[in-house]
Amino acid sequence: MLASFIFFTFMAMAMGSPVPSTIWRPHHRDGSNFFSSLTGTCSLNMSSIPSAANFTSTLPTPTGQRLQYVAVGRGIQNYTCDSSDPTATPAPVGAIAALYNANCVVQNYAYMIDKIPDLLLQFSVNSTKDEILASDSPNLLGHHRFGNSTTAVFDLNTASHEYGEVVAHKADSMKAPNISPAGQSPSANGAVAWLYLLPSAESTADTTSVYRTHTAGGSAPATCEGQKGGTLSVEYAALYWFFKK
């Protein structure tokens, strides 16, 4: 019964229909039970790039590469604030996210894939960094964290599989489109940028490029005014596209 209502809600959003005012609450705080109802076991080496991946018109095109994995990232973007200077701009210090395998969604419901980050952002993570990184489910592709403020790590090893680790750096970016979901109130400060990342020599996975697109939320407020200092976490969701030769 719950799975049917979840799927109806997702379909309603995907087709632009009003969503019922009574919103379901996922049993897992990170929404993994919702995603489990939409995914299964699909080929991990897709030969063609779906039309949903229209981000290549602005970011570099993955020429000579094929789509390896598609994941929905759900977690938090972290920033630091200096409490002594309320006019200072929050400094980004990376992200923490669970990566849900969306290969089956892309194959079977490609026209819906760009709606999922906005939908999942409606349900609060309410989890700490350690809880997010410890999360596990049958449809989990892996976890995303930062080695330092400029080094993104995609750990694609779980209890179910070992696909390696992608250690990557930003090679290009673009501002999220104006229609991107701004985020959860009261932190609706805009969607974080779309990114093009290239793996470094430390990577153990055979991934050759990663794109972060269709972002929802994640941006920090313009200044540190009203912040107590320390780490400021802002919830976000996004699509991650992994390519290989």
Image (cartoon, grey):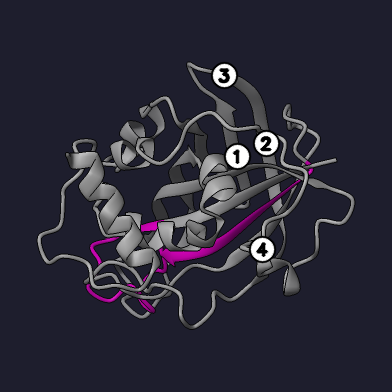
- Label 3 vs label 2: CA separation? 15 Å
Check disc 4 and report its element: helix, strand or loop.
loop
Task: State which quadrant residue 79 falls in.
Answer: bottom left
The circle drawn on residue 161 is 3
Q: Please name the residue that numbered disc 1 is placed on.
A: 153
Check disc 2 and report its element: helix, strand or loop.
strand
* Residue 157 image offset from top left, x and y in percent: 56, 23
Disc 3 residue type?
His
Using a 10 Å C-alpha cutoff, classify the residue at mark 2 as few (fewer than 14 neighbours), some (14 to 19) or many (20 or more).
Answer: many
Tell me which label, 1 or 3, sits earlier in the chain: 1
Front one among 229 and 84: 229
Tell me which label, 4 or 3, sits earlier in the chain: 4
Does 70 appear above or below 138? Answer: below
Q: Is 235 within the magenta?
A: yes
* Residue 163 image offset from top left, x and y in percent: 65, 25
Q: Please name the residue that numbered disc 4 is placed on.
A: 51
Q: Which-is-in-front pick, marks 2 and 4? A: 4
Q: Is 206 within the magenta?
A: no
Point out the stretch of residues depicted in magenta. 208-236
Q: Is residue 231 visible?
A: no
Q: Please name the residue that numbered disc 2 is placed on.
A: 166
Check disc 3 and report its element: helix, strand or loop.
loop
